[in-house]
Amino acid sequence: MQYDPRHLAATRTTPQVSATWQSIRMFSVALCLVCLNLSNTFADWKDDIGYTQLWSMVGSSLPNGNGVPISIVEAGSGTPSKYFPDTTNDDFQADDDPLTSSVNFIDGSGMQSNGISNHATNSVSRPFIGNTSSVAPGANEVTVYEANHYLSSILRATGGAAPVSQPYRVQNFSWIGSYENDSHDTSALRRFDFVIERDNITAMVGLNNGITSMPRLFAQSYNSIAVGRSDGQHSTGLTDFSNYGPGRSKPDIVAPRGTTSASTATMSSVATFLHSAVAGTDAAKSETMKAILMAGAIKDSPHFTSTWTHTPTQPLDDIFGAGEVNAYNSYLITQGGRFTGDAEVPTPVASHGWDYQTITGGSGNELEYLFSVPVGSTATELSILLDWNIDIPSGFNSQTLANFSLDLKDSSGQSIQTSNSAVDNVEHLYLTNLGPGEYTLSVASNMTHDFGLAWRTSTLFDFASADFDDDGDVDGRDFLTWQRGYGKLLGAAHSEGDADGDGDVDADDIMVFHAQYGSPPELASALIFAVPEPSTLVLVTGGLFAFLLRRRR
């Protein structure tokens, strides 16, 4: 396999594996020097993915990845193969850890003594679980495998025995590769998808840096999450391996980091953070978690170099997938709860939520969900993502893909958007500026199969108002209402301090109060303005009281 050196930061060929196994060529997606030279464009990536905003509202009670079983599979460099992170790095020590514990790195391949990998340290482990460089600083135990060992002895990619069990909720693969043999690549992809389904793993796989062709391993798998960069500088387009589902859009999602290695590890970090919020529920299923992550993705990142688009038969954008990861949105989806679709009567759902269940195939067995946009509000966004796994039999000699579809209808029964790809294992609806009313979502499949579904609805009042007690003016009592409600993330009523109608009580709402305070009754509800999205809560309680006192003098 040859890659244009202009697009590859560096290539590294792994050592020859045992003579009983076909040799595989692997290429590191990025080197440490690239990671240490990240563009300032991505300096505030925690702001970009909504984590800073979430922390400002929830604080230290946010999940931090503690207790989530995780793993790294790392392509080694040099001879002997160096794949292990520097365990003495400050980002892995107890001093800055939320649990005051150092990270315990477990050597899954038994070759840690080969030496330290800068790529494993700075491009992967730090953005995955670092105390200051990740969103899962509480994940303090990780098993590390060398990639060739993983392929030959865990996945058993070209052998006859079943893959070894992998007891991890999140597993990171910040490398690309190929056996340069169609049969072996097909076997590796099938076994990889089999393990994800059997062991219920959220597997993050990297693409290549630069505008390059689609790598085979493991970007062209079905059940993983293929990760690109928010600036679009990665392998893009459709899968092209004729043996294993050509024509599917990749990546699945992007992250605002300067290399695909760091982007993949950042996605693993967000997934670990979310898994710690849903442990023990069906939201932790690989299908559901993938849907939660992708439904939460935003379409208007300032890092995007082109407009996000999709079609009824191509659910994802060729460059940005479902969009840029947003931890805030996806966390709200986990907190919205489960709503079980029904084949008889549509299930009313909240603004954010998820479902995991098995549908009976065939016409007349559609599962339905009822979405509502209140009178006086507009749904500025409705994002719905359906995901299911490809089925691989235990002989690993074939694959079966169910064919699902989504259809959203208005109250008159008129279809307003569909998603019906014949080749992908995701379907995606994304609508903007939906008016008030009820909308019915139908999930259909050609065969009996399980699936994960996730959604988020962003609404705004047509007329923002900080008159929370509806007494005709905006005064100190309304501020106290906002203060009591501050931090409510979902389902907030106007009477609880939600001035703009987005269902939470946050800094946006106090900005409405600030603009309307002291207004005559007839003007209070007419002061409408565009509310910016602050990264932190700038106005503090003491300052607001001082402001109120000044206005009363």
Image: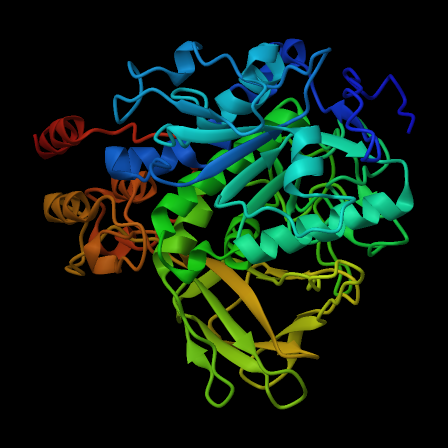
Q: Kindly identify the residue that appears in the image at 71 percent across and 29 percent down.
A: 148
Quarter residue 366 falls in: bottom right
Q: Relative to the observer, which residue lies in front, 303 or 220?
A: 220
Q: Relative to the observer, which residue lies in front, 392 or 288?
A: 392
Q: Kindly identify the residue that appears in the image at 55 percent across and 41 percent down.
A: 325
Task: Say if 377 sits above or below 515 in the image.
Answer: below
Q: Kindly identify the residue that appears in the image at 64 percent across and 48 percent down.
A: 163
Picture coordinates of residue 263 (x, y %)?
Answer: 60, 30
Colouring style: rainbow
Picture coordinates of residue 264 (x, y %)?
Answer: 61, 33
Q: Is residue 531 visible?
A: no
Q: Relative to the observer, which residue lies in front, 171 or 325?
A: 171
Q: Kindly identify the residue that appears in the image at 58 percent across and 27 percent down.
A: 109
Picture coordinates of residue 78 (x, y %)?
Answer: 72, 11
Q: Is residue 86 left or right of residue 317?
A: left
Task: Say if 536 sits above or below 488 in the image.
Answer: above
Q: Relative to the observer, which residue lies in front, 507 or 446?
A: 446
Quarter residue 507 falls in: top left
Q: Is residue 513 visible?
A: yes
